[in-house]
Amino acid sequence: MQHPKPSYKTQSFIFFLWVLSNVLVLATSKSTIEPCSNSDSCNAMLGYKVYTELKVSEVASLFQVDPISILTANAIDISYPDVENHILPSDLFLKIPINCSCVDGIRKSVSTHYKTRPSDTLASIADSVYSGLVSADQIREANSISDPSVLDVGQTLVVPLPCTCFNGTDNSLPAIYLSYVVTPEDSLAGIAARYSTTLTDLMNVNAMGSSAVRASDIISIPLPACASNFPSYAADHGLIVPNGSYAITASHCLQCSCGPGSLNLYCEPASLAVSCSSMQCKNSNLMVGNITAQQTSAGCNVSSCNYGGFVNGSIITTLSTSLRPRCPGPQQFPPLKAPPTSVIRDATFAPAPAPQSDGSIAGAPQSTVPSTTSSSLPGLAPIGGPSGSSSAACSLVTPLTNLPSVVLLLLCVKFMMAIL
């Protein structure tokens, strides 16, 4: 028995659906999502591009974080006078430290709130103010907004921001994760080189079946870090500091640093310390951060006063002694930068450029076609990914901002109207 041949209209409709599905794929950006099932949180970071000239305190207000924490996370010298009111240049790239929680089964930050202004739209808030770290649809859903064209001036909006924890490790080593918005100039290989990791590691962390990325994708980048081992009842439990930077803690009394050349957390009194509890180790004349070394015939006797966490307003100290084969050298610190007045195209402040080793012309546009395959199932850790983690590179639908895609969609609609 022969089946009837599909009519011309049926064939045309199938073709239309195929074209439409491809248009939607091209108009979709990806964001790495980490499933979770508990109520714990972690320290994480956002890659943020300043959308206009703003004071440090104004940037901090956008994310409801401590202005000093932004400066220390980017190794900017906090000893400058009135540094919190320093004006940052437009397009400056900053790492913003945030708290990453488990909300509705996925990792995200929901502690950020934004008060609307007369000229605001959900799109301008998402794409400009928060530099693409969130979409207009995500803000609309988080705030149950039925009509996004109507925003009340002064309305307070929850701004859900992407973040990942992955147990604070990458390949079993301490790490903190940076949520990074891909730019048109980026390639995954260029991003890996910029942040001293490998292409394979980035693909595993983000559960990617292909190295293809496109502008507006949000990926997680593991940054090597120094982890603390403070008790769970300490206010700064879980403190982790990316290599090459600092963190302020204990009510601005202590500054902790990581690296260079070592992933051992080192804390000492901060330059902002004014009214602080005792920083002296018991039964010793040593203060937090002090180290003494004495060479003997058996080796080097080393004593150090270490920071052990901030508990009920008090600085916990621990005195440690050890015999080492040789005496340690002077403590090394990450280099500090002066508060920036212009955009500096260096490894800290600039986005990652696409490599030009393939013989292409410098500045030529790179392919931004997203991958449609994945080597991992959602909710399962990718092969070789962060130990004990779960990740999935999920596609989140965003507005059709790609002009060719919009034109193609309109042509498809016109085609359907003609044949029906």
Image (cartoon, rainbow, N blue to C red):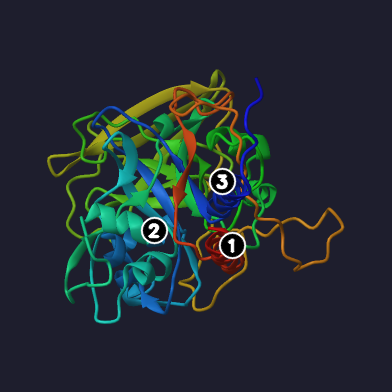
The image shows residue 132 at horizontal and vertical percentages of 44, 61
Say which residue label 2 marks: 135
Q: Please state which amino acid type lies under the numbered disc 2.
A: Ser
Q: Please state which amino acid type lies under the numbered disc 1.
A: Phe
Q: Please state which amino acid type lies under the numbered disc 3.
A: Pro
- Which mark identifies residue 260? 3
Q: Residue at x 44, y 65 (%)?
A: 131
Secondary element at image label 3: loop
Mark 1 neighbour class, 10 Å CA radius: few under 14, some 14 to 19, many 20 or more: some
Decide if residue 156 is in sight here. Answer: yes
Mark 3 neighbour class, 10 Å CA radius: few under 14, some 14 to 19, many 20 or more: some
Residue 106: quadrant of the picture: top left
Mark 1 or 3, nearer chain start: 3
Please tell me which residue lies in front, 216 or 275. 216
Residue at the far front: name it: 1
Say left or right for 47 vs 235.
Answer: right
Say which residue label 1 marks: 415
Relative vertical location of residue 274 with respect to residue 199 in this rendering, above or below: below
